[in-house]
Each structure stands twice: as C-alpha cells, then as structure tokens.
Image (tube, helix red, strand yellow):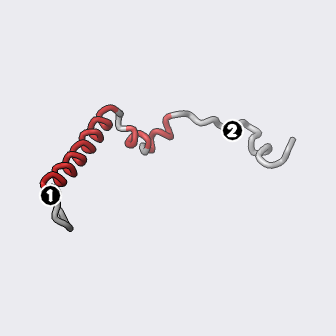
Amino acid sequence: MIKVIRGNPTPEELAAALAVVQARAAATAAASSDTQDLPEQWSDPGRIARHDRPRPGPRAWARTYWPV
C-alpha cells in the first residue's frame, strides 16, 4: 500500500511512482530467485567449522616465540 504524506500528486505522477516501485520489486524478486540464498549461507556459523584446521606439531609451543 502506498500512502501520499505530502503534496497532491496527479494521477499520472502517482502512476509513474507506482510503476517504479513495481519494477524495483520485480527486479529484486528476480535477483533473489537467481541466487541460492547467499546471505544466509554467508552468515551460517557452521560454514567456518566445515574444514579441518591445521593442528600444531609436537614442538609448536617451543617455536611460538623463541627462534630456533
């Protein structure tokens, strides 16, 4: 629903504004159907834990600060 807050638009101006809003909504709907919900996948915390991280070797604690 569109509500005019200020002014007194003509029917042609109102129709033009409505056409822009409808075109924008159609473009957004078409773009979202093309993608595979990337924002939801991007923010998924399980995405970080899917890969094994390298584990330190047996003497890694000795090499963390002091050069050998």
Q: Earlier in the sequence, mark 1 or mark 2?
A: 1
Q: Nearer the viewer, residue 14 or 46?
A: 14
Q: Residues within 10 Å of mark 2 (few under 14, many from 20)?
A: few
Tell me where residue 10 appears, x and y as whole percent. Answer: 14, 57
SS category of the residue bearing label 1 = loop
Q: Gap between marks 1 and 2, in whole Å?
A: 71 Å
Tell me where residue 6 appears, x and y as whole percent. Answer: 20, 68
- Residue at 32%, 36% in the rendered image: 31
Amino acid at circle 2? Pro
Instruction: Tell me the mark number nearer the camera, choosing from 1 and 2.
Output: 1
Tell me: 46 left or right of 3.
right
Tell me: 21 left or right of 60.
left
Amino acid at circle 1? Thr
Tell me: 39 left or right of 55.
left
> Number of marks in the image?
2
33 above or below 11?
Answer: above
- Place residue 23 in its image quadrant: top left
Tell me where residue 55 appears, x and y as whole percent. Answer: 65, 37
- Place residue 8 in its image quadrant: bottom left
- Residue at 43%, 45% in the rendered image: 43
Q: Which residue is mark 1?
A: 10
Residue 56: assigned label: 2
